[in-house]
């Protein structure tokens, strides 16, 4: 057994926060072997990114390594990255340790060509003459699978898709064949099918260069599929670490077990069983929507139709640009479609779009729990607003006392702490804010709720709690949900019926069981295949205990 | 948390920053003194700002006359102290005119959109196209001379700036998810405007008001200097400097000391404006 490439020993990092120092990492110890992939898993605030930043010496202002060591064992002997400064650190960064950043949308300089961005590490480390660098850049772009690399090198970031940009960033990271590649949520901003290809590329490159990869991810399924070893972080401490399979099959800590149970992609559950067909309550017919006019017109939604029965959940699934949000917003009455009809019960949503009483019937919960609450209004004010505007569900105007009592009932209903009412949104966590948004949507007792990626921005445990909450409320209040998501694993958890969208067209509609277990369309199958899941999980269930949709997919 | 790694290239750790609070305290102190001069000038000087003692004309600063005396033997400090009332009241009125009219135009334009917005903002463009001083002088010619009219004229020149800022803030807030959510909660246009759009967009406008207060003092002083403001012998800061310009070579204190007072008050107002902007951002 050779020595590991990277050994982190008792690392502690803290940030300056107003007066005191807040601990971000407390006594973290990790090992990463040569040529291995170590996945660093944890929820937001667990210290994953701080670990990565400490290794490359890029802690944000106010951050400080309090103690511990980060030993990188190179050919010339080990180096302690925690003590390295200035030139010595710059010499390591990019050459020995490279970073693949999280968001390909913002990590490339928009006024530089792709070629210039990829050439940057080569130039900084004086790799060769300009002519040689140019050739190397084209070679690298070709290696990461960009078509027509000569032309790509001359293009600017806005001319490339998200997946292509991430490939360019990977090309820059591997330019100097570093011993260690740190990939910080490399695919979180990408669609699942693109995510799979990017992860495949990282795997290939690792095999070719013999580099080690530190893969930072919030997605246990990605870690399970790609990593040799997993380290679970929680609140800046190491919960547990070990070989992937051991950690996932026999988690030593209860926290890991919770994470596993909450990760929808790893859960061994079947889709909801189909119900006997009934009259649909929400009907969307031949819906079409165009953005722009004339020659610039872009057809975002093209002839989509589906029905939702009362008290059930219909999922709209698709990747970015599939038109799912456009449909959801049209159903909630936020904009008029170019063509087609939407009915809820006997109401024509398109015609009654500007009618305030429509708000009693359908409510929208939007994707971003951080943006959908007014930062200056307290939780109670936000939740009570629909009642103030529209009166009680039966149309009566409410006096102050009744308003307050209904708001506190709503706060209790979504399982927020009772004193949450007086707080401002910034004092709440992401999951709590989304609970507030749900409480605000439900206080008027609508029949239909459109949930636009309502759990996508949340950590898995919080996501599981919100999904459970939505299921409970559906049972109690008989709500009908239109659930918009890119995540098929979530669909399996919550949906009765599914429509799969691709570039504005419905490629497949059916019950969750049929679409997820027996997909008819190639695109649905591709989406299902792209959901990350480790081979051994697939084979173990294929061995015949409990058939999962993943196995069929 | 994990989003910051690409955005924060600074590898430096724990950089010490200067204390910004000290300058803010100083600015508030300067403005407080100027306001005290305006309200109770008698507490700060024993001299009469209007009556001079001919024997004491053009004396340099001394313990008896800290700012010296002018050509007719009036105590300069007394004139500066008594002038604060005119200058600050004029600046306040000017800011109020600009703030109220400009914000009303901007909020109306930003919240209604369409033709109304286009029409209002083109009027604002026209206002912006005319040099401020020329516009102020034209307004004074229409309204007549005097402290109040000079202040109104200065206020009118700042309407365009307020209108543009208010409109941009309203447009920004209107596009946020929470405003959409408020409409989704059944809010009427006016209710959403009152509850969400105005509170979230007026912070920057208030900061601009503090900034404009400083520049209004300057503009009113300019008008006073040109002879369009307060008529002599009323003490007003711009007029004080204007009256003394014949003595620049022989009696430096007559222009320099009131000039320094104006500069200090304007800078203090700017510093406070910066603090308001920071805290509302």
Image (cartoon, rainbow, N blue to C red):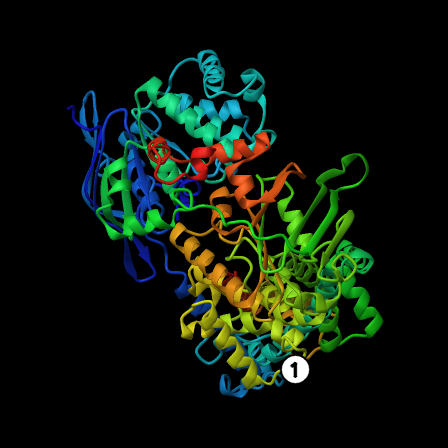
Which of A145/A485 is in front? A485
Say which element carries label 1.
loop
**Chain under disc 1:** A
* Quarter assignment of residue A371: bottom right
> Furthest-front residue in view?
A276
Seen at 42% across and 58% down, the residue is A465
Seen at 58% across and 60% down, the residue is A311
Which of B103/B189 is in front? B189
Residue A322 as seen in the image, left or right of residue A86: right
Q: Quadrant of the N terminus of chain A?
A: top left
Q: Percent from the top left, x then y, of residue B24?
A: 44, 66
In this rendering, the answer to whether A169 lies above or below A513 is: above
Count neighbours of disc 1 (C-alpha within 10 A) and say few if under 14, some if 14 to 19, many if 20 or more: some
Residue B205 appears in view: no
Seen at 63% across and 48% down, the residue is A325
In this rendering, the answer to whether A479 lies above or below A192 is: below
Which of B211/A298 is in front? A298
Residue A541 as seen in the image, left or right of residue A517: left
Q: Percent from the top left, x then y, of residue A278?
A: 65, 55
Residue A393 appears in view: yes
Query: Total marks drawn?
Result: 1
Q: Percent from the top left, x then y, of residue B21?
A: 40, 65
In this rendering, the answer to whether A526 lies above or below B233 is: above
> Furthest-right residue in view?
B142
Disc 1 marks which residue?
A397
In this rendering, the answer to whether B157 lies above or below A13 is: below
Residue A441 as seen in the image, left or right of residue A44: right
Residue B79 as seen in the image, left or right of residue B113: left
Which of B172/B158 is in front? B172
Q: Percent from the top left, x then y, of residue B221?
A: 65, 68
């Amino acid at each position: 057994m050779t020595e590991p490439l990277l050994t982190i020993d008792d690392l502690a990092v803290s940030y300056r926060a107003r007066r005191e120092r807040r601990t971000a990492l407390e006594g973290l110890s990790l090992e990463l072997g040569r040529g291995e992939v170590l996945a660093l898993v944890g929820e937001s605030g667990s210290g994953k990114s701080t670990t990565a930043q400490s290794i490359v010496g890029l802690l944000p202002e106010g951050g400080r390594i309090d103690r511990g060591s980060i030993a990188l064992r190179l050919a010339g002997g080990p180096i302690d990255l925690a003590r390295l400064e200035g030139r010595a650190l710059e010499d390591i960064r990019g050459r020995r340790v490279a970073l693949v950043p999280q968001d390909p949308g913002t990590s490339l300089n928009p006024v530089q060509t792709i070629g210039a961005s990829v050439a940057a590490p080569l130039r900084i480390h004086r790799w060769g003459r300009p002519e040689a660098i140019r050739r190397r850049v084209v070679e690298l772009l070709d290696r990461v699978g960009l078509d027509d690399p000569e032309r790509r090198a001359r293009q600017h970031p806005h001319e490339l898709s998200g997946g292509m940009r991430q490939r360019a960033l990977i090309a820059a990271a591997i330019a100097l064949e570093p011993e260690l590649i740190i990939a910080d949520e490399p695919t979180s901003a990408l669609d699942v099918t693109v995510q799979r290809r990017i992860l495949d590329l990282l795997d290939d490159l690792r095999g070719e260069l013999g580099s080690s990869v530190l893969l930072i991810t919030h997605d246990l399924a990605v870690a399970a599929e790609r990593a040799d070893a997993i380290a679970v972080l929680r609140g800046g401490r190491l919960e547990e670490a070990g070989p992937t399979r051991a950690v996932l099959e026999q988690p030593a800590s209860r926290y890991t077990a919770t994470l596993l149970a909450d990760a929808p992609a790893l859960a061994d559950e079947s889709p909801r069983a189909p119900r006997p067909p009934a009259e649909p309550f929400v009907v969307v017919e031949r819906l079409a929507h165009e953005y722009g006019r004339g020659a610039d017109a872009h057809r975002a939604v093209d002839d989509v139709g589906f029905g939702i029965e009362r008290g059930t959940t219909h999922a709209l699934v698709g990747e970015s640009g599939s038109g799912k949000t456009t449909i959801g917003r049209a159903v909630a009455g936020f904009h008029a479609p170019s063509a087609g009809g939407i009915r809820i019960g006997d109401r024509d949503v398109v015609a009654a779009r500007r009618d305030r009483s429509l708000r009693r019937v359908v409510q929208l919960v939007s994707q971003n729990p951080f943006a959908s609450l007014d930062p200056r209004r307290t939780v109670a004010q936000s939740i009570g607003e629909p009642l103030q505007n529209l009166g009680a569900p039966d149309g009566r105007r409410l006096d102050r006392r009744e308003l307050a009592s209904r708001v506190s009932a709503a706060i209790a209903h979504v399982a927020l702490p009772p004193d949450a009412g007086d707080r401002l949104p910034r004092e709440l966590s992401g999951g709590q804010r989304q609970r507030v948004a749900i409480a605000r949507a439900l206080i008027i007792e609508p029949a239909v709720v459109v949930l636009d990626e309502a759990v996508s921005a949340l950590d898995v445990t919080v996501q599981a709690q919100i999904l459970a909450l939505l299921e409970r409320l559906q049972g109690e209040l008989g709500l009908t949900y239109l659930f918009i998501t890119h995540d098929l694993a979530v669909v399996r958890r919550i949906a009765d019926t599914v429509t799969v969208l691709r570039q504005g067209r419905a490629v497949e509609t059916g019950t969750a069981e049929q679409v997820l277990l027996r997909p008819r369309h190639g695109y649905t199958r591709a989406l299902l295949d792209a959901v990350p899941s480790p081979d051994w999980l697939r084979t173990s269930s294929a061995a015949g205990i409990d058939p999962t949709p993943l196995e069929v997919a | 948390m994990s989003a910051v790694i690409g955005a924060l290239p600074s590898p430096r750790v724990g950089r010490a920053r200067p204390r910004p609070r000290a300058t803010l305290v100083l600015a508030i102190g300067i403005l407080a003194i100027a306001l005290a001069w305006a309200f109770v000038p008698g507490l700060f000087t024993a001299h009469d700002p209007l009556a001079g003692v001919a024997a004491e004309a053009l004396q340099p600063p001394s313990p008896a006359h800290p700012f010296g005396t002018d050509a007719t033997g009036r105590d300069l400090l007394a004139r500066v102290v008594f002038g604060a009332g005119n200058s600050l009241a004029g600046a306040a009125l000017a800011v109020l005119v600009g703030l109220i009219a400009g914000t009303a135009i901007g909020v109306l334009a930003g919240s209604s959109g369409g033709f109304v917005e286009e029409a209002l903002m083109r009027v604002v463009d026209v206002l912006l196209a005319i040099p401020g001083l020329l516009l102020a002088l034209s307004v004074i010619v229409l309204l007549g001379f005097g402290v109040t009219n000079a202040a109104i004229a200065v206020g009118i020149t700042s309407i365009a700036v307020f209108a543009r800022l208010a409109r941009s803030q309203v447009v920004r807030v209107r596009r946020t998810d929470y405003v959409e959510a408020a409409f989704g909660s059944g809010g009427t246009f006016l209710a959403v405007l009152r509850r969400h759009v105005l509170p979230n967009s007026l912070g920057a406008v208030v900061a601009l008001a503090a900034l404009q207060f400083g520049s209004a003092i300057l503009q009113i002083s300019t008008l006073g200097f040109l002879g369009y403001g307060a008529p002599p012998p009323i003490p007003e800061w711009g007029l004080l400097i204007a009256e003394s310009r014949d003595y620049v070579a022989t009696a430096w204190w007559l222009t320099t000391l009131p000039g320094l007072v104006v500069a200090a008050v304007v800078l203090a107002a700017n510093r406070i404006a910066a603090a308001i902007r920071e805290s509302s951002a």
